[in-house]
Amino acid sequence: MRFSDRGAAAVEFGLVALVLFTLVFGILQFGFWFWSWQAAGHAAREAARVGAVDPCGTASIQAAGAQALDGVPTGTGATVTATKAAGATVGDEITVNVTFESIDLGFFPFFEASIDKSATSRIENVPAGCAP
């Protein structure tokens, strides 16, 4: 009795394809997440720099953080929040927190796509008329 090799390549591809596609989509998912993670840190630092020279300009702090996230794959809208002590003066610290959901390709049910980064700067200037 003679056995045929017909279909052997399809079976082998079926076995290898599962591992190959899992690896490719895992690399893509990690790449999106890492890009978002790095960009969130950059946005928090940029917003903290703006807050260091104008701690009362909440809108400008949030705008700086949002502008730094332009083009970044955020799954949900990003929130940029600044925290400073009441009555802050030169030398105090301002902390900016950036939070959003990274893109989730949906291939890995255990994947946590939330990004939360913060940056702290020393307040260098308190403009006249500013009551932090």
Image (cartoon, rainbow, N blue to C red):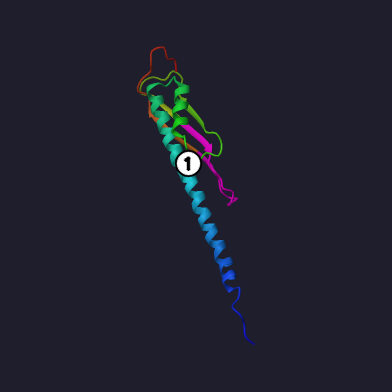
Question: How far from the left and from the top, in percent, is residue 84?
Answer: 45, 24
The magenta segment: 96-115
Q: Camera-side residue: 87 or 55?
A: 55
53 in relation to 27, above or below: above
Amino acid carrying mark 1 in the image: Ser
Question: How far from the left and from the top, in percent, is residue 28?
Answer: 50, 51
16 in relation to 33, above or below: below
Q: Quadrant of residue 18?
A: bottom right
3 in relation to 49, above or below: below
Q: Camera-side residue: 61 or 118?
A: 61
Q: Is residue 36 left or right of residue 11?
A: left
The residue drawn where x is 56% and y is 70% is 12
**Quarter that holds the C terminus:** top left
Q: Quadrant of residue 77?
A: top right
| Predominant SS of the magenta segment | loop
**Quarter that holds the N terminus:** bottom right
Q: Residues within 10 Å of mark 1 (few under 14, many from 20)?
A: many
The residue drawn where x is 51% and y is 35% is 99
Q: Camera-side residue: 89 or 11?
A: 11
Helix, strand or loop status at disc 1: helix
Q: Which residue is mark 1?
A: 36
Taking the magenta stretch, the answer to whether it contains residue 19 is: no
The residue drawn where x is 38% and y is 18% is 126
Most extreme residue toward the bottom is 1
